Amino acid sequence: MDESYLMHEIKIHDKVFIPYITFEEIEHAIKRMANTIYEQHKEDVPVFVGVLNGVVMFMSDFLKQYPGQCEISFLKLASYEGTSSTGKVKIQMDIPMDLNGRHVIIMEDIVDTGSTLEELYRILSTKKAKSIKIATLLYKPDAYKKDLNIDLIALTIPDKFVVGYGLDYDGLGRNLPDIYQIKTEE
Ligand code: IMP
Ligand code: MG
């Protein structure tokens, strides 16, 4: 297939998206993050807890770059409808693993308003983990409304809707290897 075809504008449902962050750039940022976390957790076996579904690509590539021993688990939340956060977060699948005494690193695809993050902290705080850190692939500082610290950020982006590399627009776009940004009239 022609390479340029993969990096063109795309249409998902009613919106047009333009190429924004390439898979190569994403890979570099993930590798940096994996090494940073390893430096902090050389002496223990952390548990990476992925937030489904958006985290699937990030988690899979991150784990391949993580140079130490680790365990993985997942949970599922839901907050988004369309291209703006509803602010309401509900748990759909709890973490099926005992986190008592463990160093836990929550893996998120994106932190937008922070509502999901707040709910994650609330859920995790009942599980007696030894430590809890948050790692996110993408962070939108201009949209963030909470005070909770985000420990690890791979890429910081403006407050514009993105799809690809696990992120969806109403269910579609998750399988794109690169990240695309919504095309808006200037
Ligand atoms: P928050 O609770 O507002 O921080 O939103 C977090 C969740 O909303 C993420 O886990 C994503 O599922 C979704 N989300 C936020 N921004 C975007 C975006 O730009 N594209 C796709 N999904 C997004
Ligand atoms: Mg999500």
Image (cartoon, rainbow, N blue to C red):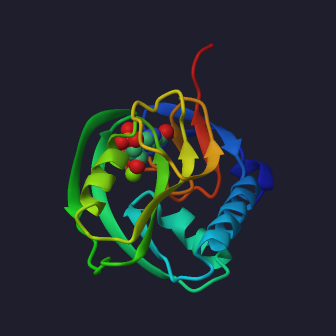
Please state, as top left, top right, bottom left or bottom right, where the C terminus lies in the image.
Answer: top right
Decide which of 101, 146 is in the foreground and name it: 101
150 over 105 or under it: above or below:
above
Please state, as top left, top right, bottom left or bottom right, where the N terminus lies in the image.
Answer: bottom right
At which x and y percent is residue 66?
A: 64, 76
Decide which of 155, 129 is in the foreground and name it: 129
Asked whether residue 51 is in view, the answer is yes
At which x and y percent is residue 135?
A: 52, 57
Decide which of 99, 87 is in the foreground and name it: 99
Q: Residue at x 39, y 60 (%)?
A: 53
In the image as oriented, which residue stretches furthest toward the top? Answer: 186
Q: Residue at x 28, y 34 (%)?
A: 86
185 over 124 or under it: above or below:
above
Asked whether residue 169 is in view, the answer is no
At which x and y percent is residue 22?
A: 72, 51
92 over 171 or under it: above or below:
below
151 over 48 or under it: above or below:
above
Q: Is residue 60 left or right of residue 132?
A: right
- Residue 112, picture quadrant: top left
At which x and y percent is residue 174?
A: 49, 55
